[in-house]
Amino acid sequence: MNIHEYQAKALLKSYGLPVSDGRVVLKADEAKTAAGEIDGPLWVVKAQIHAGGRGKGHFKEPEAGEKGGVRLARSVAEADLFARQMLGRTLVTLQTGAAGKQVNRIYIEEGTDISRELYLALLIDRKSSRISIVCSTEGGMSIEDVAHDTPDKILTITVDPATGLQDFHGRRVAFALGLTGHQIKQCVQIVKNLYRLFVEKDADMIEINPMVVTKEGSLRLLDAKMGFDGNALFRHPDIVDLRDETEEDPKEHVASKFDLNYIALDGDIGCMVNGAGLAMATMDIIKLYGAAPANFLDVGGGATKEKVTEAFKIITSDPQVKGILVNIFGGIMRCDIIAEGVIAAVKEVGLKVPLVVRLEGTNVDLGKKIINDSGLNVIAADNLSDAAQKIVKAVKG
Ligand code: ADP
Ligand code: MG
């Protein structure tokens, strides 16, 4: 689960990290007051969306002189104007995709006089199963190019969980970033506090880009992207409170409400499967036969008819889905429950695309009978590869 920059900065502040004074603005009328509460002479007006690259982004149908989702203002009046211009507009960045994201919140922040822009991130390195610190002297808006063109300018330090974070980790970061004097001490403290925040809140990513050296020579965190492990949210109600549902895929949101493990993907074959392993295998075999899955969906072991119905509705509500493959191995899950769920859902929302059903296991005969008796136009399949071939053929012809 991701949060907005302004929420991330509030968290950073609560961990004693150096962030600037700022105010969030939800309605245009609040912008002037918010800007007025912040000391000048420089204000930064920042669109809040769950995507980076805002500074280099552009608005759809831009007005004259309008630039990007991060703008420097020289007066309260200008900050107010920029905030009003951005609210409600659609911002397109490298990370939003072509559709862009609607800006519903603005953060107005005190402007910083920047001397250098650095990159600092903490993330979970899946290869080593450890927390890694990633840093670079080339922070700022072109970090993607740096990663691509000069990857040697990015340093990764892995933290051994047996020792946890030590001061030497922070010093290595400081030296890699070319920091001197009291900045080194400050950097060690920053890395320490970021690590503590990361572990205590079960984050899976904290990206500070840029962390800057100010003209006065101290460090400050000017941008923050934070993500949290969805499976650990149950123990962090304070983080759950930060959820902005408008930023999430509505299908994934409904799925989480019904406790379904659903992830939207790019392909055109909707999948309903029980068990994460079988769901992965189903996605693989769809690929093997030349198509791509539209989603990952694990309805779980003990799904009820209602849950299956909801799952099916989520799949059919996706305009990308050109065909559906139901692949169930009835162990704890019974095939007749799946059959009833599918039929209930089809009765409610209709079926406009081909549907292949492969059932195996507990109550398989009853399940098949329920589907056959339903009069629905279902293509039956006997095994996994037969099912995959049939749905790919039905979709691709
Ligand atoms: P994004 O990464 O989405 O483009 P950032 O918050 O990193 O957004 O802002 C883009 C750039 O704007 C930064 O690299 C920095 O140069 C500048 N910037 C951001 N916040 C401030 C600030 N408070 N004061 C001065 N400059 C800022
Ligand atoms: Mg940034």
Image (spheres, rainbow, N blue to C red):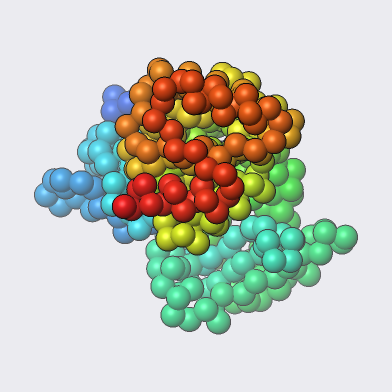
- Residue at position x 67%, y 58% in the image: 124
Q: Is residue 4 above or below residue 240?
A: below
In the current view of this chain or complex, which residue is farthest to the right? 162
List x then y, in percent, for residue 238: 64, 29
Nearest the camera: 163 or 248?
Answer: 248
- Residue at position x 57%, y 44% in the image: 382
- Residue at position x 45%, y 75% in the image: 148
In the current view of this chain or complex, which residue is farthest to the left? 64
- Residue at position x 77%, y 64% in the image: 159
List x then y, in percent, for residue 297: 55, 40
Nearest the camera: 342 or 321?
Answer: 342
List x then y, in percent, for residue 178: 59, 76
Query: Is residue 267 something that shows in the picture?
Result: no
Nearest the camera: 257 or 182?
Answer: 257
List x then y, in percent, for residue 345: 46, 22
* Quarter of image, res 8: top right
Compared across the picture, whether 11 is left or right of 189 comes to left
Q: Quadrant of the N terminus?
A: top right
* Quarter of image, res 77: top left
Tally the numbered discs: 0
Query: Is residue 152 something that shows in the picture?
Result: yes
